[in-house]
Amino acid sequence: MYTMSTNSINGATDQESLTLPLLSSHRSLANSTSQVALVGANVCPIESLDYEIAENDFFKQDWRTRGKIQIFQYLFMKWSLCFLVGVIVSLVGFFNNIAVENIAGVKFVITSNMMLYNRYGMAFLVFLVSNFVLTLFASIITAFVAPAATGSGIPEVKAYLNGVDAPGILSLRTLVVKIIGSISAVSASLLIGKAGPMVHTGACVASFLGQGGSKKYRLTGKWLRFFKNDRDRRDLVTCGSAAGIAAAFRAPVGGVLFALEEMASWWRSALLWRAFFTTAVVAIVLRALIDLCLSGKCGLFGKGGLIMFDAYSASVTYHLIDVPPVLLLGVIGGILGSLYNFLLDNVLRIYNLINEKGIVYRIFLACTVSIFTSCLLFGLPFLASCQPCPADASEACPTIGRSGNYKKFQCQPGHYNDLASLIFNTNDDAIRNLFSRNTDTEFQYSSILIFFGTCFFLSIFSYGIVVPAGLFVPVIVTGASYGRFVGMLVGSKSTLNHGLYAVLGAASFLGGSMRTTVSLCVIILELTNNLLLLPLIMLVLLVSKTMADAFNCNIYDLIMRAKGFPYLETHAEPYMRQLTVGDVVTGPLHLFHGFEKVGNIVHVLQTTRHNGFPVIDEPPFSESPVLCGLILRAHLIELLKKKVFSSTSVPIHADAFNQFSATDFAKRGSGNGDNIEDIEITEEEMEMYLDLHPFTNASPYTVVETMSLAKARDLFRDVGLRHLLVIPKISSVRTSTLSAVFLQCYLKIK
């Protein structure tokens, strides 16, 4: 018998667990204890999650004793927590948007007012210092308080939903820093977004609510104890990630599909319903809050619109002549998206060389990027020539002291600076300007090209700094700029207006960088409120994704790989069809007998970091060797704590069950498990015996050793396993050990 497992990893990993006779060439670099450093020297302790329910005798007895009230409580808490997740995430998303609009808005108003009096030097100083202070604050709290809050957080949540429990990624500290740091960093005019951090925020909220109660925060009610297992927590985190997208883009259906297509590797219909319910709550709460803001109660700039871009046109029509430009957009989006991923991946690795040197260097890098960004945003509009205001402008021209399409900047009265309307603005307003209809003559070719190049490279250099930063909005604004440029080149040869070309360009760049299709299509339709664009968006997404897949994988997979997160890809490699599971196992195996000496259990737990151990019975307790099942490390530690020992190898007495409760064997929150070193066992107790039968999972997933590695890998990923028992084909007991051996090239564990 063999065991396959995604085992615990830390600096003291056993030497035998690193034996990789066939797959060692695929080992990846170790990830760092800091989520800022992508490829570090220090190994980060990562635990796999136990999605499989341990169906032992105690578990079955516990469920048999539950009545209708307990079952109702369990179902009620599932839906109640989804409701709470939806309400909290929508409130956070709304608060984030209002805070960014008001902070950034006040900054732009002060700067614009100074420019009206030709005080350009003082205006630049105010703009530079305010951005610097906001970036410095965001980088300090992120670097010192919660380094795991760096970046978008989508790679971390995706890894978690694939079964990886890295320390700190869903903690309360990370949640607080993610919210405050994202507001500060986005308000600092860095070319980053808040959609990715909202996904991470939703996952953190769900994780906190799904901890099953907490003694630290005095949340120990019976109604909270039903969620002390990784499976229910994973489902709630999935709903939280869907709620994050729904709150960021006001796209409830798109949020569900994004969680299904991109985030979760395990899905079922019941989870689909709960995720949809969660995002529906988000949509309803946001609608109510937006109505509140429309009455003018959300500050000078806060209107609560979030990212709701005005690209709607009731008379959108397109013909066969419009298909070639759309196909061209898809091809360009695929090439640019793959190039974007390649450059971002390499820039992050270069940044790591700086981040590894310490916190001061990380903060210095963030401040340097902020100063460089402020100089570009303030200086580049001076390169554009002033344009006369159109006579039929749909809004005031020029725009002074507020957001709009016609920024005055340095121009004389009656004129506007088209580049300033894009670059000297918040990212959301820039996208609105690019998507807006009836503005085909608003922008110059040179302004659009300058804006595209600025967004493309600034978004790459801004992502890797030590602040919460998303990629969705930078990718949208970059894609919209070159989409608008293509529309300007096509001109009157197409029936589509330039704003719709900007929407299609954003879709193509999203498809080329993030490689999702269905969810992105729905998100774009929901945030633009234009269902008539569906066929064109579908076409451009399919073309861009197909083109980009020829070069590299999506951006989140690249970041996960660089950070060293163990992750099973969607499809098995072709060579895995030629290997069997018996080819990749190695030994020696650490196992226990049904009646095991306490000293042996303590010794194995102290000398290994394995999470699960096979349990077998041998003569004289059985006629032939029999596999009893699998017992978890946490359950063994709990048995040692209770000290239900006997002096001889006899079955445990039925009264001993009264010493345990369901919460004793429940999974605690991340990083809160007991250690074997904390348990005191006397020499006399070391010679006693422990009956493992009632606490052994008698129905573990088991395969024969001749099964192909590809098929076993599919089972491992699709079911969300942590352990897989491999039974020899011949009728003998042959044992070996596996500690993080299964599919090492895919898990990338060290």
Image (spheres, rainbow, N blue to C red):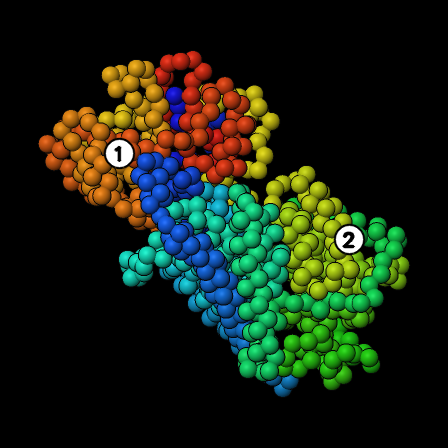
Percent coordinates x, y for residue 54 in the rendering: 37, 38
Q: Is residue 467 left or right of residue 385?
A: left
Q: Is residue 152 above or below residue 646?
A: below
Q: Residues within 10 Å of mark 2 (few under 14, many from 20)?
A: few
Which residue is rendered at x = 35% and y = 53% of the image?
225
Element type at mark 1: helix
Which residue is rendered at x = 48% and y = 57% of the image?
79
Is residue 351 visible to us here? no
Percent coordinates x, y for residue 19 in the rendering: 40, 26
Instruction: Please state which of residues 272 and 525 is positioned toward the viewer in this rendering.
Output: 272
**Alpha carbons under labels 2 and 1: distance apart:** 58 Å
Q: Is residue 491 above or below residue 127?
A: above
Q: Residues within 10 Å of mark 1 (few under 14, many from 20)?
A: some
Mark 1 residue type: Leu
Label at residue 605: 1
Instruction: Please state which of residues 268 and 36 is positioned toward the viewer in this rendering.
Output: 268
* Of pointers 2 and 1, the one earlier in the residue sequence: 2
Percent coordinates x, y for residue 212 in the rendering: 36, 54
Which residue is rendered at x = 63% and y = 41% of the image?
552
Residue underneath mark 2: 535
Mark 2 residue type: Pro
Q: Kindly give the residue lying farthest to the left in the view shown.
A: 684
